[in-house]
Amino acid sequence: MEATLKKTERVVENLNRALHHIFAVDPQVFLIGEDILDPYGGAFKVSKGLSTKYPDRVLSTPISEEAIIGIGGGLALCGNKPIVEIMFGDFIALGFDQILNFASKSVSMYGTKLDLNMIVRCAVGGNRGYGPTHSQSLQKHFVGIPNLYLFELSPLHDNIAVFEKLVNLTYPSIFFEDKVLYTQRIYTDGLIDDLFSYEFLDTANNFARIYADSFEENSCLLIAPGGLVPRCLAAARELFIDFEIETQIIVPSQLYPFELETILGLLTDATHIFIVEDSVAGGTWGSEIAHQIYSHLWGKLKNPVKLIHSKNSIIPSSAHLEKQVLVQKEDICNSVKDAVLYV
Amino acid sequence: MYEIVLPKFNNNDESYTLLYWLLDAGKPVSKQEAIAVFETSKAAFDLESESEGILHPLPQAGDECKPGDVIGYLFATEVERQDFIQNSGAKTKETKDKSLTITKAAQELIEKHGIAEESIRKLGKSIIKRPDIEKLISEQNQSVVTGLEISRQQMAIARVVTQSHNQIPKAFLLMKVYCDAAIQMLNDHGTKHDVIIGLPELLVKITATLLSDFPFFFGSLIDDNRFMPGEVANIGVTLDLGKGLFIPVIKNVGDKSLSDVANTLIDFRLKAMRGQFTEEELNQGNISISINMDQDSLVTIPIILPSQTCMLSLGGIQEELYLDTEQHIKTRSYINLGLAYDHRVINGREAAQFLTKIKTKLEQPSI
């Protein structure tokens, strides 16, 4: 039964199973957030069944992001392992102070290192027509905060392993979940489709690499967080079928700090490197990664690193306008084609 | 026969999972009867039949189906269904085989050359790219030989000139060299010593004297920023007497007399006629001269050998009228002397200095 269920498991089911697993193995884990109790089970059903099984450890709250994250930070300070759910990641901004000035600082503010296990989960990303305040990807605003780790949901990484790592990280972390992924199938056994497969590049299963066996050159390398995987995959397929441009995709589970060393070899071999993300232009996560790549590989790169991100605009509600702002498959294809074909 | 088309259950999912059929194949279905259960990301849905008939399901439990897919048929009778199964045996097999992924470029070639699907499948690959099809076409072409064959020797030349063309950014300088004095001198010398010596021999000899002043013209580029000069002048000369093009090398020309050079060239001409050279005779050149002195031949722009930095080119002897110092019309002879040079190593200024030096020595010859 387990095996057949897993075969068609959706990302949200995998995430839900990971929460159930982590609740079962660790009594110090809590979930705090808005509308997370059964039968509703959260806006995206991630917490389905948890409050029924663990009524004392699932706390439903009013709309009060700063208080929610503040409670999480306090619980973590006392040795618990809270998971905080921000229903729409846009509103993590209301809890920014708790993350920046309390949780992340508490790790090293008291003279000795303090283990602080708090996970802030937030649904991010657009392409759903939810408008300017329910569609953003705010990862970039959390890059470079001391002691704060950033992770992202992907259809390649098994969330059981990810959450086992996060609840025992000893540092606060934010787990970004692109809401478009929830209903998609999670990939297993290294298989994606007729063309692409995937593998992990490190024993910690942090870096996934999507590749095609039949590619000989792999001239292009995309680095993309999990939320971009469907669009990158569609672009890689079109680039190959229509133009025979061979692309591989690197998907890190941990966005920051970024462990560049694992992929240095791949970066050196690639002719063109692209960093794809949903953040709007300016001070992006990708620019930080590009800087790290330049610092390590200046003189060895064959071409400049290209950033692909959303336009510097608020995100429109209207679907056809939203598409113009957020990164689409076509934007990825065009950037790659520009670099490869029209030099 | 009625097609059962999977409707759209919601806006979020691209596909749904068939959990199970509620009826077995061959069972009668009535209108609005639930026939299958599908699961979306949010819930399970019963699929109700919009028509009636004998059920013939297509996907199996656990399969992913997309809205718009035909997931089964309804037949009026069981006999009709059995007929359909019989007739569609081949058809279903064909669709089961459809695991080929073909790129657009490959597909265009397939259509252009009318390549059968069978031969593509024989490649044993599931991903088909343009090079795969190109290989297939060239294999097919090999069985039907058309056109004229190119000799193995010419293929070897093809490789060298292609390499040169791809690697060497070439520039070319052409200079006029008056040659009456040289011809006169060579005739006198020949009569006296009973040898036939022409301008090529003289040019070889003169070229060798420039070795120390122009090191970058005698040697090879060994890296982007390193040049290896030759220690002595080893000068290759193009010879083609009907057995193919050869560039035998006269070694250490600086130590040879003009007569030695002439004798070596006579020996080379005989070998070129038979097409027999040893490896030794064809190797170690560090500069070459292309000789094309046929009547009315103006000049050839030579291909620089990949291991060298330049090649001189000697054209046929031309005549022209000119006004001498007393304003009398007279005739004089000249040759076009060309220099193709690797612009990564040599610039126009040095090329001009090099040719001017040769020109001066040819126009005021001494032995």
Image (spheres, coloured by chain):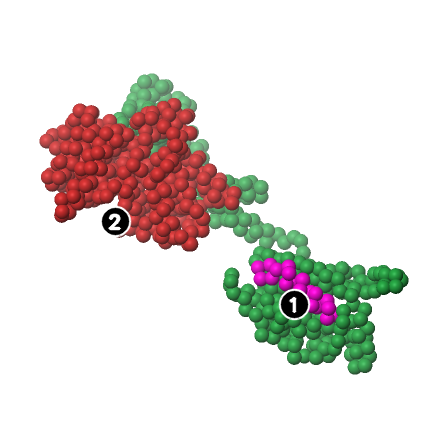
Chain colours: A red, B green
Query: Would you say the magenta stretch is mainly helix, strand or loop?
Result: helix
Residue A7 in the image, given as x and y percentages of width and height: 28, 38
| Numbered range of the magenta stretch | B343-362
Local crowd at mark 1 within 10 Å, few (<14), some, or many (≥20)?
A: many
Residue type (three-letter) at the residue carrying disc 1? Ser
- Residue B248 visible in this rendered orientation of the protein: no
**Location of the C terminus of chain B (image quadrant):** bottom right
Circle 2 sits in a helix, a strand or a loop, which is it?
Answer: loop
Q: Which of the 4 quarters of the picture holds residue B88?
A: top left
Residue B54 in the image, given as x and y percentages of width and height: 36, 24
Q: Which of the 4 quarters of the picture holds residue A250?
A: top left
Residue B246 in the image, given as x and y percentages of width and height: 66, 68
Left or right: B317, with A169 as reference point? right
Question: Against B268, is B161 above or below?
Answer: above
Residue matched to label 2: A204
Residue matched to label 1: B288
Residue A26 in the image, given as x and y percentages of width and height: 13, 40
**Location of the N terminus of chain B (image quadrant):** top left
> Which of the numbered marks, if any, corresponds to residue A149?
none
Q: Is residue B29 magenta?
A: no
Q: Residue at x 24, y 27 (%)?
A: A43
Q: Which of the 4 quarters of the picture holds residue B227?
A: bottom right
Left or right: B300, with A220 as reference point? right
Left or right: B302, with B95 as reference point? right
Q: Is circle 1 on the same chain as circle 2?
A: no
